[in-house]
Amino acid sequence: MVVYMTWRGTVHKCSSRFLAGAGSHRWLLALFPLAFSAGSIVAEARLIGDASGVVQGSPVVSPDGAHLALVVLDAKTKSRHVIVDGEKLGGDYDSIAAGTPLFSPNGHRVAFVARRGKECTVVWDGVESPAYPVIGEGWPVADLVFSPDGEALAYKLRTAGKTVLAIDGRWTWRSGPYDDAIGADNKTIWGIWDFQFSLDGRGFLYRGKVGDKMVAAWGYIPLNDRKGSITVECGPPHDSIGRGTPVWSTNRPSKQGATGIGYIAVDDKQEFIEFLPAEARTSPRVKLPRRVRSDMSRPEEEEGTWDAIARGSLACPPGQAKRLDYVACRGGKWSAVISGRPGPPFDEIGTILYSPDGDRYAYAARNGPRVCLVVDGQAGPSFEGVQYPLNVFSPDGKTVVYAARTPTSSVLMVDGKQVASYDRIDAASIVFSPDARHLAFAAGTKDKSFVVLDSKAGPPFDEVSGLRLGEGGQMAYRARNGLKVFVVTGTTLSEPYDLIAPLSPVISPDGRRVAWAAMKQATWNVVVDGKAGPPCQEVPSTIAFSATSRHMAYVGKFGDDGKTAYGVVVDQQTGPRYTSVWMRDGGRLTFRPDDTLLFFARNSALIYRVAVGSDVPSPDIHLSSLVPLAPSGGQTAPLEKDRSATGSPLRICGQEFARGVGVKTLSELTYSLPDIFMEKSLRGRERKHARGKGIPPVRFVALAGVDDSAAPDAGVVFQVFADENKLAESPLLRRGEFHAFAVPLSPAARRLRLVATGGKSAVVGIPADWCDAGLVLQDD
C-alpha cells in the first residue's frame, strides 16, 4: 500500500512499511515543498495515530496549538483511553468525563477525569490520583483548573457529603471539608466557589461554606520548598461573601512574597470590604483581629459599611499596588470608591474603566435623566446618554474618547471636548490604532453610514461594519450598498460580493496587509493584498497572520470530485486535502514565533500533526546568477539556468519554480566562494570578508529533486561539498520526491561543489533540478 500526500499537486510517496505501526502510534515523516513569496517552505507531516474509534467531539488542541488530545473507544473491550500526540496517556477506563482532557494554559500539561467501575480518578500527564468513590450517577470530581504555569492542578472533590479543595502537583494537598448550599431549585450546590490561581501560579483563592457561614481563603504554593508544603489562610466567618470575590490585590505582600486578597463581606445585612492576610498567618477559620481597609497606604479614614456593594465591581487596577476599587451604595446613592475614597454620589454608576497602566480611571454615572462620564474624579458634561466601546482610554492612556447623545444629534467627545457631531455615532466602533496616533469610528446621517478616520469622513454607504484600524493607521471595514457588500481598505473599494465573513477584514500585525473572506455566486475566496486565493465552498477558520506578518493561512472547505475535504491554504497556496482539520477554539490556526504554522488533520483513519515552516529561505545570491568553474553538466549536457535540463520550466513534485538550475546526471558544479564575494555588487561587509577573513557567514540552500519530466523509476542522489568535505547528501530520490538543503558553510571554505549522481547504478541523463538554490547571508 502507498499513501500519497499532496500540497498543491506536490506528491510525497510513503511506503506502506511506515503504516504498520499506525495502530501503535508510531511516527511517520513526510515532507512537502511549497512556494512562499519570500522563499520555499517545507511542510512536515507526522502520523500520530489511527482515528478509528475517536469519540466525536473529543479532539482538543492545546492553547499553543502544538499538541492534540483524543478520547478513543476500543471497539472490542468498549473501554476508553486518552491519546496525546500519538501516545497513550494513563490506562483504560469505562468513561472519560465531559470537558476533559484539559490542557494547561501553556500547553505543556494535560489532565482528565476518568471512571473505572465505581471509582473515579484524576489523570495528570499519565499519572493517576488516588481513587475516589463515585456518588450515585454523578462524578465526585469537578471544575479542573491548571495554574498559569501548569505546575499545579486544582479541582473540587466530593467526599462524605462534603466538598474538599484538592491541589495536585509535586504535592497532594487537600483543604476542607466545606458544607453544601441549597439552590433556589432545591439542588445541592458544592460548597466552594470562585477558585482561581494568581498570575504567577504561586497563590490561589476561593470562598467556602462552613456551617451557615462563609469564609474567604487564600493559599501559597512555595515552589522552592522541597517538602512541597502548601499554606492556607482563612478570614473570619461571615453571613455571606459576595459573588465573584475574593479577588487578587497587590496589597501588602506576605512574607512568602505572594499577594493578598480582598472580598465583599456581608454581616447583619451590611456589606464591607475585607482584606487578607493579617499581620501573621492564622490557622483556618480563625477570625482576624481587625478589619483591614482596601487602601493599606492610607492609615486613617475607615470606609465603613455599605447597604450594598456592586457584584463584579471589586478590582485592583492593572499595575497598581495597595489598592482595591469598587462601587457601593448607601442611602440609595451609589459611589465609586477609588483608593479608599468614596466619590460623589449618583443614582447609578457603570463599570469602572482603567487606562492600560492603571493610573487613570473613568466611569459613567447617572443622576435623574442625565448621564455624564467621570474621569479621574472629575464629572464631565451631562447628556441624554453616554456610550463607548470596551474602554474609553487610548492605548497609551493619554486620551479619553466616547460618544454622547443630545436631543438632536450624537457627538464625539475627546478629553471632555466636543469635536464632531453627526445624526448618529456607532460607539461600539470607536477604535484607536495600536500606536494611539489614529482614531476611527462609524457615523451616519438618517439614511447613510460612513467611517471617519482622523476627522475625515469616508464615502457613504447603506451600512458599514467590522471597522479595523491597524498599525500606522491602516484602515479596513465592511460596507453594504443594496444587496451587495464590499471591503474598504483605506480609500480602495473591493469588488462587490454577496457575503463577507463576520470576522473579516483582518489586518496584519505590522498594519501593512489586509485579508478577508468573501462569497460570490456561492463560491468563497480569501483575498489578501488585493489578490484572491483558490475558490472553495466555505472558510471555516479565521484568517491568521504570522507574528512577522510575512505569512497568512486559513482553512478552506473544498468539493473535489463531489467529495468534501478540507485543506490549509498558506500564502494562497493550497495544501493537501484532509477529511478534517482540527484547530484551537474559535477555528484559530496557530503560527509559532518563528513563523511555523502548526495544525492537526485527519485523512480517513489517519491523524497527522503538520508543521509548515519557512525552513528554506529565498537565497540572497541565486545559483543561476553565478558561473561555475568546472564544465557544467559533468558527463552530460550543460546546465540550464532557471530551467530544467530539458528546456522546460523547473518542476519537482508538481511544483513549478522560477529560479534554480537544471542538470542531468552525472553532474558536478563547482563555484569559487571568494570570487563570489569579491563582486562589486555585494555589500562592503562581504567584500571585506573575502579579502581578509574568508567568506562571510553563509548557508547554501536548495530544494533538490528529480525533474517531473523524468521516468517514474528514475533515481538521483544530491550531494553538497565544501572543498573536499561532504557536508550533506540526500537519499536516493525518485520522481515525486525532494530533499531540502540548508547547509552552513565555513568561513574558510574556498569551493562549493554540487553533485547530482544516478546513485549506485550511476545512471546518466536523468534530469535533476536544484530549485531555489543559492546562498543566504547571515549576520556575523
Image: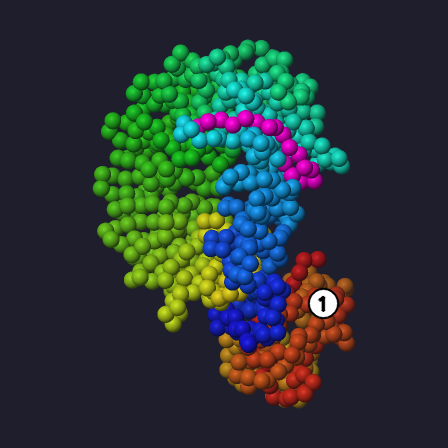
Residue, x 68% and y 28% (percent of image)? 231
User: Who is closer to the viewer here, 259 or 717?
Assistant: 259
Instruction: Report the colour scheme.
Output: rainbow
Residue, x 67% and y 18% (percent of image)? 279
From the viewer's perspective, tell me whether residue 502 is left or right of residue 290.
left
Picture coordinates of residue 341, whole percent (x, y)? 51, 16
Picture coordinates of residue 280, whole percent (x, y)? 69, 19
* Quarter of the rendering occupied by the C terminus: bottom right
Q: To which quarter of the image does residue 373 belong?
A: top left
The residue segment tinted magenta is 167-183
Residue, x 35% and y 28% (percent of image)? 386
Answer above or below: position of 296 versus 595.
above
Picture coordinates of residue 103, whole percent (x, y)? 57, 47
Q: Secondary structure at mark 1?
A: strand
From the viewer's perspective, tell me whether residue 87 is left or right of residue 554.
right
User: Who is closer to the viewer here, 136 or 22?
Assistant: 136
From the viewer's perspective, tell me whether residue 297 is left or right of residue 567.
right
From the viewer's perspective, tell me whether residue 496 is left or right of residue 258.
left
Q: To which quarter of the image does residue 19 belong?
A: bottom right
What residue is disc 1 on? 745
Residue 663 is one of the magenta-drawn residues: no
User: Who is closer to the viewer here, 204 or 434?
Assistant: 204
Picture coordinates of residue 658, whole percent (x, y)? 52, 73
> Is residue 287 among the parts visible in the rendering?
yes
Answer above or below: position of 640 versus 458.
below
Q: To which quarter of the image does residue 454 belong?
A: top left
> Is residue 262 among the parts visible in the rendering?
no
Residue, x 29% and y 56% (percent of image)? 498
Dominant secondary structure (helix, strand or loop) of the stretch shown in magenta: strand
Residue 175 is one of the magenta-drawn residues: yes
- What amino acid is at disc 1? Leu
